[in-house]
Image (cartoon, rainbow, N blue to C red):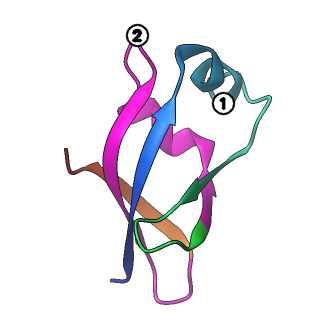
Amino acid sequence: MPSIDVVLQLSAEACLAHYEGRVGQVLASSLDGRRVAFPAEALRRVVTREGVHGTFRLTFTPEGRFLDLTRLK
């Protein structure tokens, strides 16, 4: 499966907007400089009281549809 590694630095307030559905997608930059968008729902598994901070791997289908978000560090 294709994957892209991204660094996410989202405050708790930014995550709340995603969680409440006011924002449908997260826009991020990959470690190699590409821009990527993925469903905000994916943050629900990794959000903490401080927000979402760290390096994550986004996995996609061969057609480019989001599959999974995994914390790397």
Residue at 38% over, 58% down? 68
Q: Which amino acid does label 2 sit on?
A: Arg
Label 2 environment density (alpha carbons within 10 Å; few <14, some 14–19, many ≥20): few
Q: Nearer the viewer, residue 28 or 60?
A: 28
- Residue 47 is situated, as x and y percent measured from the top left of the image, at 41, 26
Q: Which of 35 and 21 is in front in this view?
A: 35
**In this rendering, is residue 9 above or below 11?**
below
Distance between the Cα atoms at labels 2 and 1? 14 Å
Q: Name the residue under label 1.
A: 18
Secondary element at image label 1: helix
Quadrant placement of the N terminus: bottom left
Q: What residue type is labelled 1?
A: His
Residue at 60% over, 66% down? 36
Quadrant placement of the C terminus: top left
Residue 49, label in figure:
2
Label 1 environment density (alpha carbons within 10 Å; few <14, some 14–19, many ≥20): many
Residue at 76% over, 36% down? 23
Q: Which residue lies furthest to the left in this view?
A: 73
Q: Residue furthest top?
A: 49
- Residue 37 is situated, as x and y percent measured from the top left of the image, at 64, 61
Q: Which of 29 and 69 is in front in this view?
A: 29
- Residue 56 is situated, as x and y percent measured from the top left of the image, at 33, 52
State yes or no: residue 13 in magenta: no
Q: What stretch is highlighted in magenta?
A: 36-64
**In this rendering, is residue 1 above or below 53?**
below
**In this rendering, is residue 11 above or below 37?**
above
Instruction: Using the rendered view, name the quadrant where residue 35 is placed.
Output: bottom right
Relative placement, left or right, of 72 versus 15 is left
Between discs 2 and 1, the one toward the N terminus: 1
State yes or no: residue 54 in magenta: yes
